[in-house]
Image: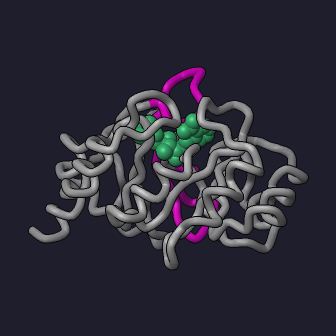
Amino acid sequence: MTRVGDALLAARLGADAIGLVFTARSKRQVTLAQAREIVAVLPPFVATVALFMDDEAALVQQVLDAVRPTWLQFHGNESDAWCAQFGHPFLKAIAMGEGATALSRLQAYPHASGLLLDGHAAGEAGGSGRTFDWSLLPDGLEQPLILAGGLHAGNVGEAVRKARPWAVDVASGVESAAGIKDPARLEAFIRAVRAVDAA
Ligand SMILES: O=C(O)c1ccccc1NCC(=O)[C@H](O)[C@H](O)COP(=O)(O)O
């Protein structure tokens, strides 16, 4: 989320959480001031997730102090110990599509509250709009899985039925441009997720 109106709409439509990207590698990067403005207007019980990718610890701490997000989320090569140093709950994103390497990383984050399994496109940071093979997901992982990568209203039902994740995450599939949410796509996405829940 980069805009107050988009965040409020997502909350009204029933999103459990909204993401704020702080890494400079993103087309969706927000400033501390933008993030504070968004967080200030969110209704109760909508969680906020602060996203980073191989950033300096000082930036993470600055965001914790100024924005007070519910969760941190790390998208780079950060180790489990590095992510845990802040004493704040975190999610670790794993770029799928790297075969066995990605699968071995699923065991490497015992301190993470959950793992976000993301699509992967060479040279792109995140929010790539790429899916991955959902059948790659192993059974029996202890941590909750958040499914991401190339989801949209047209495929999220199938994705949830196949992967049975704890939650789903979306960026480009509900946007008209990077960081700009499309109200109709956002509504269709949340409806599609709810339709699977109800089935
Ligand atoms: O969205 C970004 O620009 C971004 C940049 C750097 C690191 C992570 C980023 N986003 C991470 C997300 O959690 C996205 O929602 C996720 O990659 C799914 O994106 P999409 O495939 O576009 O739905």
Indicate the position of residue 155 as horizontal and vertical percent values: 21, 42
The residue furthest top is 123
Residue at x-position 37% and y-position 67%? 166
Q: Quadrant of the C terminus?
A: bottom left
Residue 174, image x, y percentages: 36, 40
Instruction: Please identify the dominant SS of the magenta region.
Output: loop
- The residue at the far left in this view is 199
- Compared across the picture, whether 14 is left or right of 8 comes to left
Tell me, yes or no, if residue 199 can be seen here: yes
When asked about the image quadrant of residue 48, the answer is: bottom right
* 120 inside magenta stretch: yes
Q: Residue at x 38, y 69 (%)?
A: 140
Please give the name of the residue rendered at 74% of the width and 62% of the height, measured from the top-left corner: 67
Residue ID at (69%, 31%): 25
Q: Which residues are magenta?
A: 104-128
Q: Nearer the viewer, residue 161 or 103?
A: 161
